Image: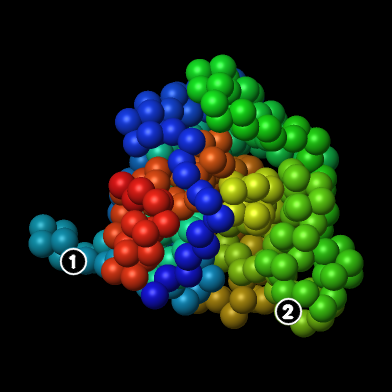
Amino acid sequence: MSKLIVPQNYRSVLTIYETQTAIGSIKKIFEENLCSALNLKRVSAPLFVEVQTGLNDDLNGVERPVEFDIKETQTNAQVVHSLAKWKRMALHKYCFPAGEGLYTDMNAVRRDEELDNLHSIYVDQWDWEIVIDKSSRNENFLKATVIKIINSICNTAEKINELFPVLNIILSRNVQFITTQQLEDLYPDLTPKERENIYVKEYKTVFIMQIGDVLKSGNRHDGRAPDYDDWTLNGDILFWDDILGCAMEISSMGIRVDEVSMDAQLKKANCGQRRELPFHKMLLEGKLPLSIGGGIGQSRLCMLLLKKAHVGEVQVSVWDRDTLSACKVAGIELL
């Protein structure tokens, strides 16, 4: 059975009909805010990629992609886990100049996801990527971009409050920046998730930086594939969710690897065989643009702004029987 949190006396603020209207409004308003803040153009994106391209996101390296054979091409394709690498290739192919970027709707299937209030096997997010120059590969530029995204989210929340005053959602624009090592130093006896919860509960809006590498303890805060984010220049945006009483990750993002950082990270991850894949060869040869990018969860953002207790209230997916039964008893209406 998946893990289920049932908030005491929970009832959705909006009806199912109102929820559908609000989801549409959130997506339209947020896209407009994000495009304006980051100078983005909308592009079409793939649902699947061929295996031999190396473009699929390997996540933590253990998740099984949904794979199938294609009759006409006699090759295999995989449903994407994310578009982290595809976007950078698209920036190159479409000849985007520095300072401009793309965004798209990304739909993924993660068959091995552990299901709970925040996790589904269906993933929907805004994927975005921007061409940058070498002078922008630094922490200050990363933080400035994070602030723009958080302001876009808060602007959207304010507009949704105008449309649906009953929600009265309050988010903080004041983001607290902290590294994973600083978190471990503060709370050495807690798990990574426990550290996130206690810290985000205090500061409400947090960007946790430098995810993927080994900490002083010998453990990782969380896994990251070695071939897209630079582990020294990445992070997660989290907001405190009063409904579930926990930190909610809205976005994973970062400045992407260059030739030097990908070479080092492939060695650390024992993934040297990837060097021969088309994407990796182009990057190591300096043929792809430098970039910053990430994903912003569509259903997660709708949950947060609409005060929902379960991701199944804002997206249609598949759930085990126990979850369906428990949600029905608790008054959590899954779509």
State if disc 1 and disc 2 touch (CB < 8 Å): no
Q: Is residue 2 above or below residue 282?
A: below
Task: Using the image, tell me which numbered label, if any, was put on residue 223.
Answer: none
Helix, strand or loop for disc 1: strand
What residue is shown at x 48% (from left), y 28% (from top)? 26
The residue positioned farthest toward the left in the image shown: 71
Q: Residues within 10 Å of mark 1 (few under 14, many from 20)?
A: few
Front residue of 192/9: it is 9
> Which residue appears at 60% of the width and 36% of the height?
131
Of 14 and 126, nearer the camera is 14
**Mark 2 burial class by Cα count in 10 Å: few <14, some 14-19, many 20+:** few
Q: Which residue is mark 2?
A: 219
Q: Position of residue 80 (x, y in %)?
A: 37, 56
Say whether residue 141 is visible.
no
Q: Position of residue 255 (x, y in %)?
A: 67, 48
Q: Position of residue 269 (x, y in %)?
A: 62, 76
Q: How is the image coloured?
A: rainbow
The quadrant where residue 299 appears: top left
Report the amino acid beneath label 1.
Asp
Label 2 amino acid? Asn
- The structure residue drawn at horizontal position 51% and vertical position 49%, both measured from the top left corner, is 10
Q: Nearer the viewer, mark 2 or mark 1?
A: 2
Q: Is residue 19 visible?
A: yes
- Distance of label 2 from label 1 (alpha carbons): 38 Å
Q: Measuring from the top left, give residue 175's x and y in whole percent.
A: 79, 40
Residue to which mark 1 is pinned: 69
Q: From the viewer's perspective, is 69 left or right of 196?
A: left
Which element is circle 2 on? loop
